[in-house]
Image (cartoon, rainbow, N blue to C red):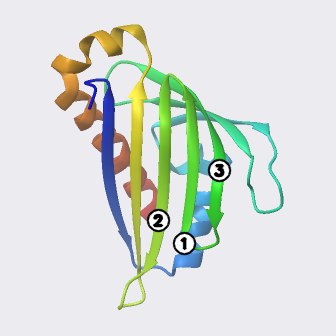
Amino acid sequence: MAATHFTLISDWHFDAPVARVWDLIERTEAWPRWWRAVQRVEVLREGASDELGRTIRITWKTALPYTLTFDVETVRVEQHREIEGRALGELDGRGIWTFNTEEEGGCHVRYLWRVEVTRRWMRLLAPLLRAVFAWNHNKVMAWGLAGARA
């Protein structure tokens, strides 16, 4: 695996039904209202009725002193089960949101993020800052969980 490639996993748990959590995650244009790392979401292309082909541009302000902007095209949707997106831009790869009902009636969400960093400085420093980049991702995801729960 290249030093510039990252596989990151985030697990979120909610005391809410899958349908409610799905609605929150699927509406990406609302993320800036509750996810403090998301500065902006811009719809570049509307998708089909099932959202396939929908493309958005997201700008993130990370816990470290830099921002990231990349486009995400929805490439797979299984209602209340899974959303997969293809990222292009300052990160290049795939992200998959998976939704599962827990026995107690809550919801478990897993986000699997397999990306390659594309910015020159990140590619050069990735071998040295790998743990820092992973920490940064985990911090951004923790902000998202806190905002989603609120």
Left or right for 130, reference 41: left
Q: Secondary structure at mark 1?
A: loop
Mark 1, Cα crowd under 10 Å, few <14 / some 14-19 / many 20+, is some
Front one among 1 and 43: 1
Q: Tell me residue 61's x, y (percent).
A: 45, 28
Q: Tell me residue 86's x, y (percent).
A: 57, 41
Q: Which residue is mark 1?
A: 81
Q: Which residue is mark 3?
A: 75
Front one among 121 and 93: 93
Q: Are marks 1 and 3 in contact (CB under 8 Å)?
A: no
Indicate which label's residue lies in the foreground, 2 or 3: 3
Q: Tell me residue 13's x, y (percent).
A: 35, 70
Q: Which residue is mark 2?
A: 98
Q: Earlier in the sequence, mark 1 or mark 3?
A: 3
Q: Is residue 150 visible?
A: no
Left or right for 67, reference 40: left
Q: Residue at x 66, y 49 (%)?
A: 74
Q: Earlier in the sequence, mark 2 or mark 3?
A: 3
